[in-house]
Amino acid sequence: MSPNTDFDVIVIGSGPAGATTARIAAERGLRVLLVDKKQELGAPIQCSGAVSAHALGDTGVQPDDEYIATPIYGFKVYDANGAAETLDYRTLKPGEYNRSPLGYVVDRRRFDRYLTALAERAGVEVWLKTEALEYHANGDGTANVLMKKFGQELTIRARVIVGADGLQSRVGKWAGLRTHIRLAELASCLQFVMDRVDTDGLLEIITGHEWAPGGYAWIFPRGRGYAEVGLGVARTLTGKDARWHLEHFIRHSFLAERLKDARVLEVQGGGVPLAAPLKQQYADNVILVGDAARHVNPITGGGIHTALRCGQIAGNFLGDFLPAGLPPDAENLAEYQRRWMKELGEAMWKLYRLKREIFRQPTAERDRMLYQTLAQYFSPRSEFRKV
Ligand SMILES: Cc1cc2nc3c(=O)[nH]c(=O)nc-3n(C[C@H](O)[C@H](O)[C@H](O)COP(=O)(O)OP(=O)(O)OC[C@H]3O[C@@H](n4cnc5c(N)ncnc54)[C@H](O)[C@@H]3O)c2cc1C
């Protein structure tokens, strides 16, 4: 650590990306402060919580009943008319997946708290109810972050600031990075947690412009007899809002009979970027991770796995970079993005180009391509299995 800083790294935002960056950086011997403006992490829930087992395993997170709502054993992908491809790994790969699930639906309140606890146990200093208000690069290899902690303003100095502050990232804007997202690439998502919906350990994905223009609908098991029924739509492809589409799907789709007795227990929603990763994810004293850098799968909208993986890449990068003593200016921090590109970014860009190709098509062809792409995407032969 340089002598005139309070911390080597300040991570702003303790979602999956920030908590993982902070944990790995601390494991690599850095002094890390992790702040989040919330008093209860992960709340209100704005996520369905589906995450693969390998995403957890690859980033050193043990499956734990503390945060797992229910295990997942495969997928069922429907076309617009209800024909479906079932990829149940209990039958595709018996034995292996009977013992250990393919993935989980996690409770984001408990998951985010769990990841933050892992960071804290690795030596990270964690401050909740602490909002970053602005940062200033001092020009001497350090930066100051102005924060409000329990209502009191204070300034903390560090060498690198990690913007892990989600889709609406202000850190990226403060750094002057081009974070604008086109409305056409922002899915407006809504889900109901519902009682009285039968599920069988599969993530069900329903494609078709009729049900979810610009996105897809889903039914995910939630454990304890509950299910998450939701969808994401692109507002540029419909004059109606996500709520209208969700009710239309529940009442009029080919699954309406199955959903007719379902009752709403919770309403959750939020935006998902189905966009390209940011072209530049670094600036003087700053790097961005997770949703803040658009590290989101542009076809599925899944961002937990990519947040965990990018957090791991960022934490390891900082663990190599900071002890070497180079100034953390934009030129030197560009190496972070080069590493990310090699390890994950190239595959994400490939997915983005595929997504663009699908959404360039007229409606019927788009429906066909999206269905086929998602059915292949989740198959054991998929080249994107680890994205
Ligand atoms: C309806 C919906 C369903 C989804 N379902 C899935 C799914 O099933 N599977 C999946 O993989 N992905 C899903 N996603 C996407 C996933 O939720 C995100 O990609 C993921 O949460 C990104 O993690 P993150 O750590 O980058 O950001 P976030 O989880 O958004 O965390 C950002 C954190 O930063 C904090 N913060 C923000 N600004 C400041 C500040 N100024 N100071 C201090 N703290 C700040 C916030 O309080 C927050 O805790 C879904 C998203 C939505 C909206």
Image (cartoon, helix red, strand yellow):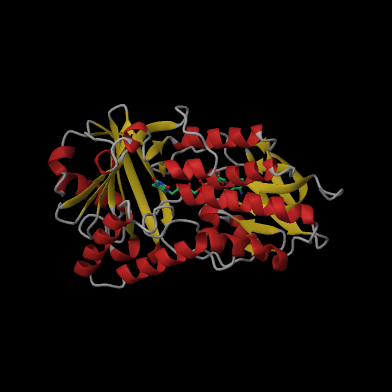
Locate residue 147, reporting x and y percent.
70, 46
Q: Residue at x 30, y 46 (%)?
A: 230
Q: Residue at x 22, y 58 (%)?
A: 208
The quarter of the picture where residue 279 lies is bottom right
Locate residue 326, reporting x and y percent.
79, 61
Q: Is residue 128 visible?
A: no
Q: Quadrant of the C terminus?
A: bottom left
Most distant residue in the right direction: 3
Position of residue 382 in the picture relative to residue 172 (left or right): left
Position of residue 312 in the picture relative to residue 123 (left or right): left
291 and 243: which one is in front? 291
262 and 85: which one is in front? 85
Q: Is residue 240 above or below residue 203?
A: below
Locate residue 79, reporting x and y percent.
19, 56
The quarter of the picture where residue 259 lies is top left
Position of residue 194 in the picture relative to residue 273 (left or right): left
The number of numbered discs placed on residues in the rendered structure image is 0
Q: Residue at x 24, y 55 (%)?
A: 207
The quarter of the picture where residue 366 lies is bottom left
Locate residue 382, reporting x and y percent.
34, 56
Q: Residue at x 49, y 41 (%)?
A: 57
